[in-house]
Amino acid sequence: MKVYPNLFSPLQIGPLTFKNRIEAAPGNTGYNTEEGFLTPETVAYFEMKAKGGAALVVIGESNVHTKTGVAHGRMPCLDNPDILPSLIRTTDAIKRHGAFSSIQLVHPGRRANADYYKGTIYGPSAAPPLFGGPIVEMDEDIIAEVVEAFGDAAEMAKLGGCDMCMVHGSHGWLLHQFLSPLTNHRKDRFGGSIENRARISLMVVENIRKKCGPGFPIEFRLSGTEHTEGGYTIEDMVEFSKMLDGKVDIIHVSCGTFHDPKTNVKMFSSPFCERGLNVPLAAAIKNAVKTSKVAVVGGLNDPAMMDEIIASGKADIVAIGRGLLADPYLPKKAKMRKANDITPCQRCLVCLSGDFVPYVKYPTRSLRCTVNPIIGREQEAMVVKPFEGRKKVLVIGGGPAGMEAAITAADMGHEVVLCEKEDKLGGLINFSEHVPFKIDLMKFKDLLIQRVNERAIKVMLNTEATPEVVEYISPDVIIAAVGAHPIIPNIPGIDSEKVVLAADIYNKNVNIGDNVVVVGGGLVGCEEALYFAQHGKKVKVLEMKPEVIPDGAYLYREALLLEIAKYPIELLTNTICKEIKNEGVIAVTANGEEKLYEADNVIIAVGLKADPNDTNKFRKYAPEFYLIGDCLKPKRVLEAIRSGYDAAMSI
């Protein structure tokens, strides 16, 4: 029987026959040149998505008219013919794997950013400055110029090898701004009714069709709802979709608007959102249109769920964004009955947060994925490393870094021994088994264990790697992944029975009382606070710095804070824990006042610290020695996975 028969059924889009129903949702890297030309690193990024089996790969936000607006740096520039050589290289790379290529056409409108653009900032209506000078209402001449620019950009895309294009009419960009009553206050034929607010979008579609012909499919991306008071609703978008029906080939359903930053965590769904949150919106639109196909995006990465979406008629296409960063080969694995080996996206938002202009102060322009160490360096991963001979590799420590190192070393052909002093693999991320909003981390941990067990790796549980044990194994290579120790601050009363280290909450089955004080407002401390509040506890978080979660990825931090706000959790910044007493915690507040916070339990979450003595004793027992994970530098799962992969690839 064919696996996921609906997901892997072909679909006719204009003259194109999609081999399956999977679209690689629009995305970009920060690796383009300053002019917006695509580099070899960018080419490899898109090629890997095509190689992984998606039917359609969409190049992300691309400027249509730099004369009247630029949102952020290094965007592909479809109003400059000099982009064509690099665009052709990119589309060729996509198509050599049997996928079709598309590109997302965008005008920022009122969201033009003065850091990258010095001209007049236009919007549907006049407004105070947002990211530059005051917003000037577009007159009909400028509207006509921008409409022509969309059509010209589509022509450029077609010439550059794109098989189709996507018009970006969602998320708060120009066409969305016209659609939204939040930003469109015009009294002329472009304002007021939904028919008037939709006019510019329909003009853009018509212009593209006139210039590119019926054989160049058009996908229109819209937000099914703005998820904010006063914004448009799904009922409005159903009416708009009826206007688009038959004029575009695909209606692509997302949600949210940058106009209200709180909707960012639905636009790019966080772990606190249900998977497929936009499916009901897509289903409403699918039910209303007669000709256009409907695509849906929104935290999708389960092939069974995606197959059901297609089978039930809620959508015709599923678009996967971050899920194809976590595992570009998701489509191929699903088709080859290997869905249990798909690396689950954590929706941790690390990939998007580093370049989330203008909200982050310094864009990193370096793409990263917590669970996929090759993201951001796809070009290197496509080059086969020459095998220099089989070595005996001892990995000490079975946390995420150690498991990734063992898996990668085994895949490289080495003999691998993995020693873990506890009775199971997983290390610190075993806590994920107890926290509902960490279910994807639990799935990833279980997948790493599965991959270890599937390979010829000798796993030695309940085995502490003493110098004697290491000497007996006699490895050629030692990879130390022994972890780090919780920092125990020098606070009077820290040895009280009511004090619990964050690392010990789950593995020691500690009973936590109703009143909880968490010392440390970093990522771990705030996640613990949320967990306890979800279980009915009254929680206070003491953080000595001016802000909580300074170590969190921007978008995940926003999502976590919004979730915390739903519960009676007090976040007390500029507050220092001075002493722990029987009644609770004595703290010094921001104004220097000493205050008692009652607590049944005090959770210490002030971080981890590596001890060189844990690893130095092993250095002399092998010619090659690597430190990875927390014993190298305590950080996130992302760094653990990358360091494990890198060490194994360096052997």
Image: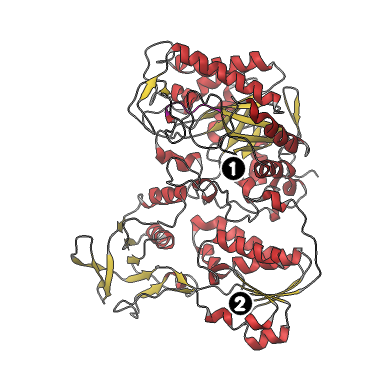
Relative image position of residue 64 (x, y in whole percent): 56, 25
Give the amino acid type for the residue marked by disc 2 in the picture: Asp
How crowded pointer 1 is (Cα within 10 Å; few <14, some 14-19, many 20+) is rated as: many
Q: Residue at x 65, y 83 (%)?
A: 620
Q: Which mark is residue 423?
A: 2
Query: Magenta span has 13?
Result: no
Q: Residue at x 52, y 61 (%)?
A: 636
- Locate the N terminus by quadrant: top right
Label 1 sits on a secondary structure element that is loop
Location of residue 575 with respect to 378 vertically, above or below: below
Q: Which residues are magenta?
A: 106-110
Of residues 613 and 402, which is closer to you in this image? 613
Q: How many marks?
A: 2
Asked if residue 293 shows in the view, the reply is no
Q: CA distance from mark 1 to mark 2?
A: 41 Å
For residue 112, which quarter of the picture?
top left
Which tag, 1 or 2, sits closer to the chain's start?
A: 1
